[in-house]
């Protein structure tokens, strides 16, 4: 209830507009892109709370140290230990099998700085868990944010990424100059 009221206040006073397809009714890998600002976290929470989506999100384990740990976990955070990335997939699979319905928020363009490729973890997690992918977005050019379509991945990296690129083609992010084209290193390696 408090989350919904907070989200409603956010959307009432924000210059941004929530534009969304219906919330997924089963566990999904929710892509958050373009990820160009720390404000993306506030948008993600406001979207999820407004639409009634239980979210889990992946964050580097240093975010969970000290006093921040309980807050980050309460907001749906799952710490990622880069030395043991397989644990995250196992934990997600366990949650799906237990019947938990949630959106696993992943920001595949990684940090909020320019680089050449998206990280492929979202693709691996979706394929290994059987979860569909939901395309979340921030678009400064239209001052909109929200959820786009949800779909099952084919397993063909090139085909899946073409569909994702088509959706994000006109999305700019909060800081457009930091936007990373949706492309996986695996696509270039396959050529």
Image (tube, rainbow, N blue to C red):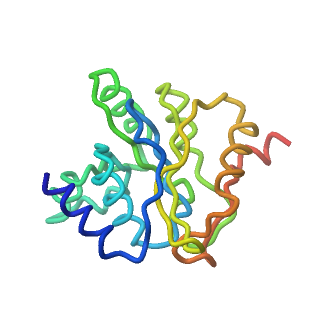
Name the foreground residue: 106 vs 103: 103
Q: Is residue 165 left or right of residue 87?
A: right
Looking at the picture, how far across and down is residue 165, in whole percent?
Answer: 70, 52
Is the residue 177 above or below the residue 101 in the image?
below
Q: Is residue 177 left or right of residue 73?
A: right
Give the residue at the far right of this rendering: 191
Name the image quarter holding residue 27. Answer: top left
Name the image quarter holding residue 154. Answer: top right
Residue drawn at x 46%, y 73% as measured from the top left: 37
Name the foreground residue: 38 vs 68: 38
Is the residue 57 above or below the residue 89 in the image?
below
Residue drawn at x 33%, y 67% as measured from the top left: 11
Residue drawn at x 57%, y 34% as measured from the top left: 151
Looking at the picture, how far across and down is residue 51, in whole percent?
Answer: 33, 48
Residue drawn at x 51%, y 64% as measured from the top left: 138
Give the residue at the far front of this rendering: 12
Which quarter of the rendered picture does the C terminus lie within? Answer: top right
Q: Is residue 169 left or right of residue 82?
A: right
Looking at the picture, how far across and down is residue 35, in whole percent?
Answer: 51, 64
Looking at the image, how many numbered discs can be counted on the residues?
Answer: 0
Looking at the picture, how far across and down is residue 139, in whole percent?
Answer: 55, 67
């Amino acid at each position: 209830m408090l989350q919904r009221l907070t989200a409603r206040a956010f959307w009432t006073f924000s210059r941004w507009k929530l534009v969304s397809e219906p919330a997924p009714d089963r566990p999904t890998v929710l892509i958050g892109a373009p990820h160009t600002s720390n404000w993306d976290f506030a948008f993600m929470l406001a979207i999820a709370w407004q639409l009634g989506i239980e979210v889990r999100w992946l964050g580097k384990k240093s975010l969970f140290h000290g006093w921040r740990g309980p807050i980050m976990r309460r907001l749906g955070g799952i710490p990622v230990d880069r030395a043991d990335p397989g644990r995250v997939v196992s934990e997600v699979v366990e949650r799906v099998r237990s019947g938990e319905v949630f959106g696993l928020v992943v920001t595949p363009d990684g940090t909020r700085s320019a680089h050449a490729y998206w990280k492929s973890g979202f693709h691996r997690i979706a394929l290994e868990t059987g979860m569909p992918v939901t395309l979340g977005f921030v678009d400064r050019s239209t001052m909109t944010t929200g959820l786009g379509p949800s779909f099952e991945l084919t397993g063909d990296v090139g085909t899946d990424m073409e569909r994702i690129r088509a959706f994000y083609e006109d999305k700019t992010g909060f800081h457009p100059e930091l936007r990373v084209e949706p492309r996986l290193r695996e696509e270039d390696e396959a050529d």
